[in-house]
Image (cartoon, rainbow, N blue to C red):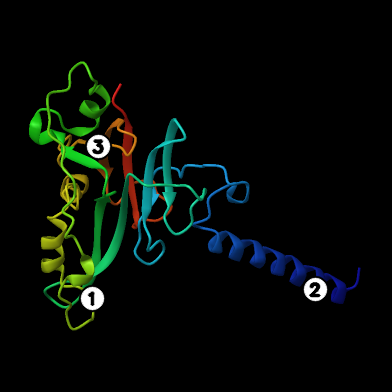
């Protein structure tokens, strides 16, 4: 084989690799088997980066009578996906003028939830989450998100982004909102609150954010680790 032919083969191989690499990057948010319209849950941890996944991640805890899971809201695996809650990140302007991510969890308008760790202060962290059952759960009262919640109404700064301080006030209208963030990002063990969620179908789910940003994720930032299950 002469040198010219060898060079052509090398160029072709590199071009093919480039196409494959670009496709992988482009398909980051695609759910498997989307063309078949089969429900496929995303793997944990979940990408909630404002730039890479602006629509965030929705959780449909029960899908057609079976245990469901998560989908990217901008790229659903099934047309009839109906979220019980969703988590997304938007950019906010900090007091020093810089911008930062402001993630929040919003319930479906017909879904209710409660911070169960305020009902039972001893019930916090992943171990308590795993051990929580119908047999040991205490009485609780569920609440809906405030219907007046509207991030578009938040005052904007010079950058054109909503002011972080005002944005946090708006998040306080939500049952879960961003109240999970600090415990999921500090060095204190087992202080993460456990949430009880009543789904659209009336099922009771336990829900906890354990890490943000998530460890062992594809990137150092942008991912969150969430655990959930039906209360057995």
Residue 53 visible at all: yes
Name the residue tied to disc 1.
Answer: 161
Please, what secondary structure does the residue beneath circle 1 have?
Answer: loop
Q: Reading the chain from its start, which is encountered first: label 2 or label 3? A: 2
Name the residue tied to disc 3.
Answer: 197
The Cα–Cα distance between marks 2 and 3, rounded to whole angstroms, is 61 Å
Q: Reading the chain from its start, which is encountered first: label 1 or label 3? A: 1
Extreme-right residue of the structure? 1
Frontmost of labels 1 and 3 is: 3
Residue 28's mark? none
Residue 177 vs residue 199: left or right?
A: left
The reply to whether callout 2 and callout 3 are in contact (CB within 8 Å) is no
Q: Where is residue 64 in the image (x, y as percent from the top left)?
A: 47, 35
Q: Reading the chain from its start, which is encountered first: label 1 or label 2? A: 2
Location of residue 163 with respect to 108 vertically, above or below: below
Name the residue tied to disc 2.
Answer: 7
The Cα–Cα distance between marks 1 and 2, rounded to whole angstroms, is 51 Å
Frontmost of labels 2 and 3 is: 3
Residue at 57%, 59% (x, y): give it. Answer: 24
Asked where in the image residue 130 lies, by quadrant, the reply is: top left
Residue at 12%, 55% (x, y): give it. Answer: 172
Quadrant assignment for the N terminus: bottom right
Please, what secondary structure does the residue beneath circle 3 have?
Answer: strand
């Amino acid at each position: 084989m002469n040198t010219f032919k060898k060079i052509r083969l090398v160029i072709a191989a590199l071009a093919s690799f480039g196409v494959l690499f670009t496709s992988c990057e482009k398909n980051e948010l695609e759910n498997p088997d989307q063309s078949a319209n089969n429900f496929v849950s995303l793997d944990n941890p979940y990408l909630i980066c404002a730039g890479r996944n602006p629509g965030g991640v929705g959780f449909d805890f029960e899908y057609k009578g079976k245990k469901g899971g998560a989908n990217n809201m901008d790229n659903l695996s099934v047309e009839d996906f109906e979220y019980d809650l969703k988590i997304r990140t938007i950019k906010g302007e900090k007091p020093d003028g810089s911008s930062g991510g402001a993630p929040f969890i919003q319930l479906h308008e017909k879904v209710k939830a409660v911070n169960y760790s305020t009902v039972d202060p001893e019930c916090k962290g992943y171990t308590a989450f795993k051990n929580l059952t119908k047999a040991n759960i205490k009485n609780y009262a569920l609440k809906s998100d405030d219907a007046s919640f509207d991030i578009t109404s938040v005052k904007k700064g010079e950058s054109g982004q909503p002011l972080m301080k005002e944005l946090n006030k708006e998040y306080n209208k939500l049952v879960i909102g961003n109240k999970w963030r600090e415990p999921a990002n500090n060095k204190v063990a087992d202080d993460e609150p456990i949430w009880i969620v009543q789904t659209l179908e009336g099922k009771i789910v336990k829900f906890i954010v354990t890490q943000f940003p998530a460890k062992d994720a594809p990137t150092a930032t942008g991912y969150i680790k969430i655990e959930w299950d039906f209360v057995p």
